[in-house]
Image (tube, rainbow, N blue to C red):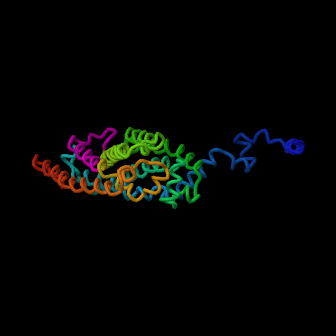
Amino acid sequence: MARGLTAQLAKPDPSPNSNTLFGILLEPSQLLKNPAFDGAKVLKKLVENYWFFTQDDIATFAIPNTIFGMCCAYAGQPLVSVKLESIKILLSRTPAVILFNCSNLLIFDLANQRLWESVIEDKLNKPWRPIPSERMTRSEVRRALQLVIPIVLAINHYVLHTGAETACIILGTWVYNDLKASDDSCITRNAIIALAFGVFNWSSLKVAIGGGGSSAAHITSSGYAWIWLFSGVILTTMHVQDMKDQAGDRSRGRKTAPLVIGDWAARWSLAIPIFLWGPVCAASMVDNSCQGHSLV
């Protein structure tokens, strides 16, 4: 103990300016301890690992939502209030639609994958993800989330005019992950995901038609009906994603459909609605056509 105290006393006193900007400039070693520098390192790691965080959801979430928004905007009335003037205008808005989907998806994936239960699950199901593969730590992902949320919210509010939608997605992300709504019930899990698809789809369509701000372009009641019809499809079929993740879901005690009702019953609970939704969606399109509109 005496040796420890002697060693502490023998250490030189830190520079009185070490915590000031001038002190940091004079002491390069202090720069490494600066929160801003730490944040920059975390963001650099995040950019390097973006694909590993989101690759499982890009094909099943971001791309379908982007296609939905672009196709509905191209279809025009009765889904939206405006008629597309040129395909070039629609194509010019494609990067904005992609930005909305990819930026909001990143928040969800960071919030989901930082949880210790998710790390245990990912070690079994998806070991290539940044935390189980030790590309980033849980603390770094938490820090990245703190930095990304205000950036994404600002971009969506001021640039894409989807600030309210992004706020809803962040709230849903909190309920789904931190409040464990995804673990307690397979019905609640599917319901939250269906709502998320609804918000992502209407936001994608809103951005694709240039809505929000001072624009008069908006989604019609027929457009919202089409959006929520798709959410109905998601509500009754989303547990298809759980069929391949049973080992990891079992390890964290998640109550997914195949673990609650059994693999055989879960497969039939997918087959029947998948068979029925095709005619239902087709009938909805025919109904709009009979009213003098066409969705194709």
Q: Give 85 or 246, whichever is nearer the viewer.
A: 246
**Residue 23: image x %, image y %?**
74, 43
Magenta stretch: give its range: 211-233
Quarter containing the C terminus = bottom left
Could you tell me if residue 199 is visible in this image? no
In-front residue for pair 136/69: 136
Residue 130 lies, in percent from the top left, at 54, 57
In the figure, is residue 36 to the left or right of 103? Answer: right
- Residue 36's x, y, as percent? 62, 45
* Displayed quadrant of residue 275: bottom left
Labels in figure, total: 0
Task: State the quadrant of the N terminus.
Answer: top right
Q: Could you tell whether 94 is left or right of 18 in the image?
A: left
Q: Is residue 227 magenta?
A: yes
Give the quarter of the image for residue 146.
top right
Residue depicted at x 31% and y 56%? 67
Q: Is residue 14 visible?
A: yes
